[in-house]
Image (spheres, rainbow, N blue to C red):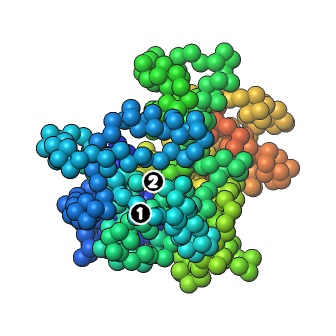
Amino acid sequence: MLRIEDTDQKRSSDAASMGFLEDMKWLGILWDEGPILDGVGGGEAGPYFQSERLDIYNSYLDQLVREGKAYPAFDATEELMVMREKAMAEKRNPRYDRAALKLSSDTVEQYLKEGRPHVIRLRLPDGFASVTVRDQVRGDVTVNETELDDFVIRKADGFPTYHLAVVVDDELMGVTHVIRAQEHLNNTHKHVLLQRALGFRTPVYAHVSIITNPDGSKMSKRDKDKALRAEVKKRTPPLASSPVDSNGAPIIAPDRWTWWLAHKDHQLDLDEAERLAAALGVHLPEINVDDFRRNGYLPEVMLNYLALLGWNPGGDVEKFDVEFLKERFDFDRVIKTPAKFDREKLLSFNGDAIQAMSVSELAARLESHALQYHPDWHARFAGKLGGWELFARANQTRAKTLEAMFQMDRFFLVDDDDPSLTSLDANARKALETGSPTGFEHVEALRSILANVEPWTVEAMEAVVKRYADEKAEGKLGKVAQPLRIAVTGGTVSPAIFDTLAILGRDSTLARIERCVAVMAR
């Protein structure tokens, strides 16, 4: 069952909710009950968005107030701050002083009639001393009365807190197991108290460790912001204003740039961060599921690797599918210590999975990735029989992600007369100008040889170029292949040369050779 917990109006949005659903679906984690997306979901326990269940929560709130187990509290924010500061000065846990319970019933009724802003707090039982949570990973965890107070279960905006909403929904929706992050363990004691007040059962709880970066810092979306700030600071001199685009306009609006730099807690919106990263040439660390998807990781690899964060399948097994996970998972092998997210290991897993695929499967994955993220590439192979399979075969052993294949081979997309193809660096120019015959002379000779190749296949091109190398380059194919690569790609790195020519096609190959010859002959 998938439930969208969106009662925090400041942090929730429809777009974010749909993003969660898309992420789950991409990972292959489909839900039997929940919001409906592309035929997945539905069920008898809905609605599955908490923001649509306010009447249900209010009925239980009314019950708690009616039974004296909860009460309205009208304290101003300033009053609560004073209370908190006093407790901290006295080196004790801040606890609500139950000032609202000292109000007469007439005063409470009057305040409610006036519409005075208020919250509703759960009233802890008289004589409360402690509450114990039995956790499947961490054992029995007890919290005493000094660590809990009459906590808020409905906010001043009329929405229930997370605590009340999940407790009610877990009961009504038949939830049997709650497996969540260690950070929620302290919340669970509140949930048990609420369950007792409402007469609800207590599900089985298991709190798993947080995920950290290799240096032990918590993995969070702030990592992207840190990467951008580090790059801005290391520039000489540090950037005082936003970089500009090709038209001279600031990448980040001046007021937003000033605001961002003013405090380390200020973060740019995702689209702003991505624009700035592109302008600075910074790779933003992947954090959200969609980051990994856009960067060409495979969903089955992500699921495999995520399962290893905090869980040990035993037997030195590391690579497995979802069926293995469903069959083998249990709490006994859940690790209590924080799990470190090793991007290099994930990248290695992904590369292994790509190399293990059939060419046809990889071609299908590349085409799907291009359709969503690279429409220019999708147009490049539209209607070309076998184009994606050629591209897949050419790059299968070179790249560890789908995205890397597109980024490495941008030369395929440029026009045949694009200046980048003949704006050669020192290494490329040296490869064309040295030797006897020179690389340039090999390219010039191959122009007419390749023009007569029929059919335009890897095998046919390889045969004629190897024959030429045997005759003119002492059988050393590299002396011929590298100048040819430079002529058609503008650089010294590409897929295997004959795969490259096959993907380019006859017309582009010959046109690029012509341009290279013309430029080098000047």
Q: Which residue is mark 1?
A: 126
Quarter of the picture holding the C terminus: top right
> Which label sits in the foreground, 2 or 1?
1
Question: Could you say whether the residue bearing mark 1 is in a helix, strand or loop?
Answer: loop
Q: Residues within 10 Å of mark 2 (few under 14, many from 20)?
A: some
Residue 280 makes an appearance in the image: yes
Rendered location of residue 307, percent (x, y) = 59, 69
Rendered location of residue 17, percent (x, y) = 35, 54
Residue 331 position by quadrant: bottom right
Q: Residue furthest bottom?
A: 327
In this rendering, the count of numbered labels is 2
In the depicted structure, whether residue 68 falls above or below residue 509: below
Q: Residue at x 52, y 36 (%)?
A: 86
What kind of residue is marked 1? Asp
Quarter of the picture holding the N terminus: bottom left
Q: Which residue is mark 2?
A: 149
284 to the left or right of 172: right
Q: Earlier in the sequence, mark 2 or mark 1?
A: 1
Q: Nearer the viewer, residue 28 or 431?
A: 28
Residue 267, disc: none
Q: Residue at x 50, y 42 (%)?
A: 413
Residue 396 makes an appearance in the image: no
Rendered location of residue 257, percent (x, y) = 48, 22
Q: Residue at x 54, y 70 (%)?
A: 132
Q: Nearer the viewer, residue 336 or 222?
A: 336
